[in-house]
Image (cartoon, rainbow, N blue to C red):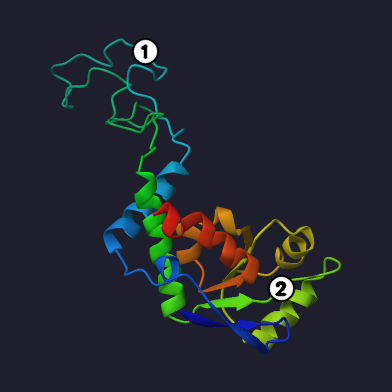
Amino acid sequence: MQVPVYNMSGEVVKQIDIDDSVFAVPLNEAVVHQALVRQLANARQGTASTKTRSEVAGSKQKMYRQKHTGRARAGSVRSPLRRGGGVAFGPKPRSYRQSMPKKMRQLALRCVLSAKAKEKEMMVLEELKIDEPKTKEIVKMFAALGVKSSAIIATSEPMENVIKSARNIPGVITVPSRLLNVVDITGHKLLLITEDAVRQIEKLWGKETA
């Protein structure tokens, strides 16, 4: 597959071939969904906790006599039926962690990358060079490229000036290409990726690792 390569001024400078084994994979919705659910589940802390009736502070004595009061029978002030009582079947600390085979995780990544390429929602940049942290440099580049939606900027290595320049723009994140993931890719409309990052991705998730 051939895609255009843009410079920071929004001009097409050349065409490059990208690996079909990474950027032209048929969408497997089941695998992508499983990878998405897994990543979101693994991000949960699982620290939510409530007290049962045995853990709530309160007297164990029967509240009032059982008969001849005109009221329903009540045995404990700590009953889940009463305000301030324990919680029935409430959450307790637990692990939400899910496992997934490495090949399936890689397939999910290739699927979402391919979907971005197919829908013309991936733009390859010749290079991304910013001499000093300035948000207006990223804004200027976005205007030249016609970017008006959320975007993820992927570079081959962490670039401090790019990170600092883009962090104040709503809906825009930066990430090293080796840390690209299903949640970030599907959660942003556009994928802006440098040519070096494309080659790094092909080495990581191309034919030889399939």
> Quadrant location of residue 156?
bottom right
Residue drawn at x 46%, y 33% is 47
| Of 139 and 11, the residue lying toward us | 11
Residue drawn at x 51%, y 69% is 188
Quadrant housing the N terminus: bottom left
Res. 137 visible in picture: yes
Crowd band around label 1 with a 10 angstrom C-alpha radius: few (<14), some (14–19), many (20+) = few
Residue drawn at x 70%, y 63% is 167
| CA distance separating discs 1 and 2 | 70 Å
- Where residue 16 appears, as percent x and y from the top left, is 56, 79
Amino acid type, callout 1 = Ser
- Where residue 44 appears, as percent x and y from the top left, is 45, 42
Residue at disc 2, secondary structure? loop
Query: Can you name the residue that lies furthest to the right here?
Result: 132
* Number of numbered callouts drawn: 2
The answer to whether residue 45 is above or below residue 37 is above
Query: Can you name the residue that lies furthest to the top here?
Result: 61
Q: Look at mark 2 in the image and give the residue it sits on.
A: 127
Quadrant housing the C terminus: bottom left
**Left or right of 145: which side holds 108?**
left
- Where residue 208 appears, as percent x and y from the top left, is 44, 55
Q: Look at mark 1 in the image and give the residue it sits on.
A: 59
Res. 37 visible in picture: no
- Where residue 191 appears, as percent x and y from the top left, is 55, 71
**Left or right of 45: which side holds 5?**
right
> Quadrant location of residue 21?
bottom left
Closer to viewer: mark 1 or mark 2:
2
Amino acid type, callout 2 = Glu
Query: Can you name the residue that lies furthest to the front here?
Result: 208
